[in-house]
Image: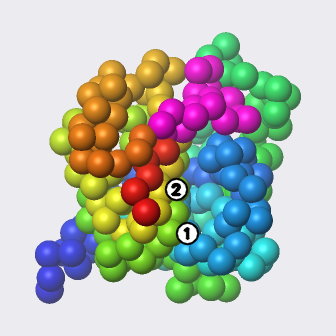
Amino acid sequence: MSRAEERVGKTKQELDRVVFIGRTYQEYMRMFDLQLPELVGKKILDCPAGACSFTAHGSRLGLDIIASDITYDHKIDDLEHKGLQDIGHAMETMEQAKGNYVWDDYGNVDGLSRHRHQALQDCVRDMRESPERYVAAVLPELPFEDEQFHLVLSAHFLFMYSDRLDYDFHKQTIKELLRVASEEIRIFPLTDLTGSRYDHLDRLIHELEAEGLRVTENKVPYEFMRNGNSLLSIRKNI
């Protein structure tokens, strides 16, 4: 068994430690400030994709999208059950912290819950119908070829968990995302779980620019967590 297979296999014992919650296609388009025409004809990677429905809906619209996540080696029924549990727990927690969020899009916790359930439902349906679009991987390593994708999207992972993932992990993961991207990667949001800007973001930007990459912070037309309305665009000089 290879090292990668061992690492992916190990995740079978770790499902309880992973939160399987996702965002809808419409949320993705706003989070990453995307327009459908600019995505046509491009190969896109969503990583880590979790229970997001961007791949499901985008594929139905003719887009070429692959989703990758640590959870995808689990049985789909188990993921669906875990997702329902996680949504229920998250909504209970949300009631206690509503002041940290902007509710313009969802109205209230029930509205948010409907979005999360819709994303999960659409994701697991597509996993059953088109399992080849869902690839298990354990960051900071990906089972893809160099520059296999034009665009890589990464949401609600890097920067958010800076209390658990150190700077080296962030740098290694971004380097790996860049390896499989031929044009650009976009990371959203730029805050940690408290809504504070990632402490080491300026250092990261400086180091990436020193490597010849074009790095910009861009405001997006989406904000749920307060201050979480910007993405990081890292472009290769092509």
Pointers 2 and 1 in contact (CB under 8 A)?
Answer: yes
The N terminus, quarter of image: bottom left
**Residue 224 belongs to magenta span:** yes
**37 or 51, nearer to the observer:** 37
**N-terminal-most mark, 2 or 1:** 1
**104 or 14, nearer to the observer:** 104
Q: Residue at x 22, y 69 (%)?
A: 7
Which residue is farthest top?
A: 99
Asked where in the image residue 141 lies, by quadrant, the reply is bottom left
**229 or 83, nearer to the observer:** 229
**149 or 71, nearer to the observer:** 149
Q: Position of residue 63 (x, y in %)?
A: 69, 75
The residue under label 2 is 153
Q: Amino acid at mark 1?
A: Ile
Q: Circle 2 sits in a helix, a strand or a loop, which is it?
A: strand
Image-based side of 40 in relation to 233, left or right: right
The residue under label 1 is 44
Q: Which residues make up the magenta segment?
A: 216-232
Can residue 111 be seen at all in this image of the molecule?
Answer: yes
Q: Residue at x 82, y 26 (%)?
A: 104
Can residue 157 be seen at all in this image of the molecule?
Answer: no
Q: Position of residue 216 (x, y in %)?
A: 48, 37
Would you place residue 223 above or below residue 10 in this image?
A: above
**Residue 201 belongs to magenta span:** no
Q: Residue at x 67, y 85 (%)?
A: 129
Q: Position of residue 209 (x, y in %)?
A: 31, 40
